[in-house]
Image (cartoon, rainbow, N blue to C red):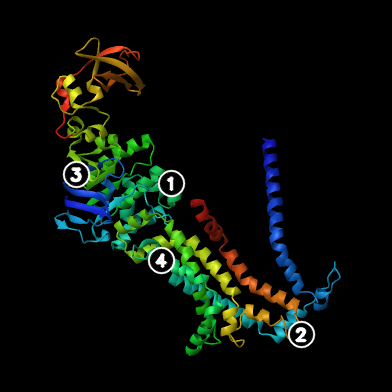
Amino acid sequence: MASIHLQNIVKRYGAFTGVQHMSLDIQDEEFLVLLGPSGCGKTTTMRMIAGLETPTEGNIVIGGEVVNEIDARDRDVAMVFQGYALYPNMSIYENIRFPLRMRGVPAAEHDRRIRQAADMVELGSFLDRKPGALSGGQRQRVALARALVNEPRVLLLDEPLGALDLKLREAMQDELKALQQRLGITFVFVTHDQHEALSMADSLAVFNEGRIAQIGTPEDIYARPRTRFVADFVGSSNVLPPDVTRALGGPAHWASLRPESLRLTFGGPVTGTVTALRYLGAGSRVSVQIAGAELAAFVPAGQPLPEPGASVGLGFDMAALHVMEGA
Amino acid sequence: MASVRKTRGESLLLRYIVLGSWAAVCLLPILWFLTVGFRPRTEIITPQPIYWPNWSLDAWYLLTSDWPIAQYLRNSVLAVAGSVVIDLILAIPAAYALSRYEFKGREDIGFYILSTRMMAPAIVAVPIFFLFRNMGLLDTVWALMLIYAAINLSLVTWIIRSYMLDIPKELEDAARTDGAGDLTILREIIVPACLPGIITAAVIAAIFAINEFLFTLLIASTSKAYTMSVALANFTGGSDGVIYNAIALVSFLAFVPILILVILIQKHLSRGLTMGAVKG
């Protein structure tokens, strides 16, 4: 149980700067998601919290203590890795036991705690198998049990669900969220999947090129992106250049407009030509050419769809047009 | 159903025929060599082809009565086993450091270690003789252990290093966040994960060591330190000429320890020799 503060962190690799003057406050028992494209510095940030990388500048404070000089093994921070990183030569039981042995937990307690951790992730019947004999989802659970067995203050998860198929991934998302609420551990979760980020986060930090582009609640970031990058990366928003914003009745500034906020009308305030249709299951995405820009509108299933080349009107609430502060 | 089983049976039969033939190709020279060891000397050197050889234990009696062959075999096994142990104790930490720690000149040091292998052994023969004489280790099995270990150390380090490079870095990161230090990681994570590579390196080192001749000849001067490879030389000249059946028998006996070693660890060895290739 601990809060984490990153104070003006810089990480350089030779001439390349991976993380640039980053400050980040993570509250105790918070579920923070770090979201961003590959190479944006989110994993590096997480590895610095874990102690696997040392910041070039700045301080990392965990639970009120500057931990820059403290080795990863002594930070009481557990981590779940993208590739699970289970020890291939040890059984599942031994894998989960490893952190207990390393931290000098009395041997008499091992069995009880291993079984408790295994039950928490519903792994009880696999304890004597080797990691090679388990499926991806089961390995994921082992990695989680191993990370949680020592009841760490902070759990770091580096794209832990990336290798799972969609259905399993959604189930694990629910489980992780429930687990975090039950245990009250601070979770820091790295992903490049915006749906995963939006559905799991208490607080969401969007990374771009080694900086935090925006941080806030998922609702806030989805509805009020501060920059074009955030609007574009979180969900599939229409990013409007100043002249298009003006043509739609807003100020001459960059703005974002979510496809689901747009309605197709017949002869609305603005009209355009349908250029493409894409079927998405729950509805269709209709691309409309308007004022020199292409906007996407989401039409729920069951509603009539225009033909490509047809002329349609677009309607929306002015409140849905979000004018961005940054460029 | 029946036809399925039949084709399966046929392909299995074919497989046995192919593999059996290949096994015969590999084994025949060794078995032929063994038969040479148990035939009279006159028969071996006759130019006439002999279809039904006569068997004789001449060579065996020669070896066991005139030569302390058991002592030679013991020296060989001790020196080889000792050298492999020394190699592993030194090479595993060295390979770990070369594969994991970032330090200046890491690649250069790695190449330097390998380059010791490229030198002609004769260049260091005289210095090594004096070195061991000054240490008072001439004509001892200890000296052979050290020499064999030194000869193979670079190769063993290099092989183990290449296996360690294949182990995902994440495993170590995980162990570190789980609370393990460097030595624990090496002992509990890295060594078990590259065990096939370590075993492969050990077998290759053992084969090189048991075949070593030049330095053994230099160090050993009595049966106290003579090994099988030097014993062979006893039968290649002298007033009796070349004693082929004794050579064959000594060679076969020298081959037995390695054969036993390979059979014992066969499972790990085949995994070790192919693992690097598959991972590419």
Image coordinates for residue A45, horizontal then vertical, percent: 24, 49
* Circle 2: element type: loop
Disc number at residue A30? 3
**Residue A73 lies in what quarter of the image?**
bottom left
Q: Quadrant of the C terminus of chain A?
A: top left
Q: Amino acid at mark 2?
A: Asp
Height in image: B260 above or below A223? below
Q: Which numbered disc flags the more N-terminal residue, 2 or 4?
A: 4
Helix, strand or loop under label 3: loop
Instruction: Name, please, the residue furthest toward the right.
Output: B48
Disc 1 is attached to a residue of which chain?
A
Q: Chain of mark 3?
A: A
Three-letter code, disc 1: Leu
Residue shown at 71%/59% (left/top)?
Answer: B25
Quick check: can you spot residue B64? yes
Residue at mark 4? B108
In this image, B6 relative to B145: left or right?
A: right
* Distance between mark 1 and mark 2 Cα atoms: 67 Å
Mark carried by residue A260: none
| Same subunit, tags 2 and 4 | yes
Residue annotated with mark 1: A134
**Which amino acid, by three-letter code, is at mark 3?**
Glu
Say if residue A116 shows up in the picture.
Answer: no
Q: Tell me the residue that label 2 is attached to.
A: B240
> Rounded to the nearest whole Å, what is the CA distance between mark 1 and mark 4?
41 Å
- Of the residues tagged 2 and 4, which is closer to the observer? 4
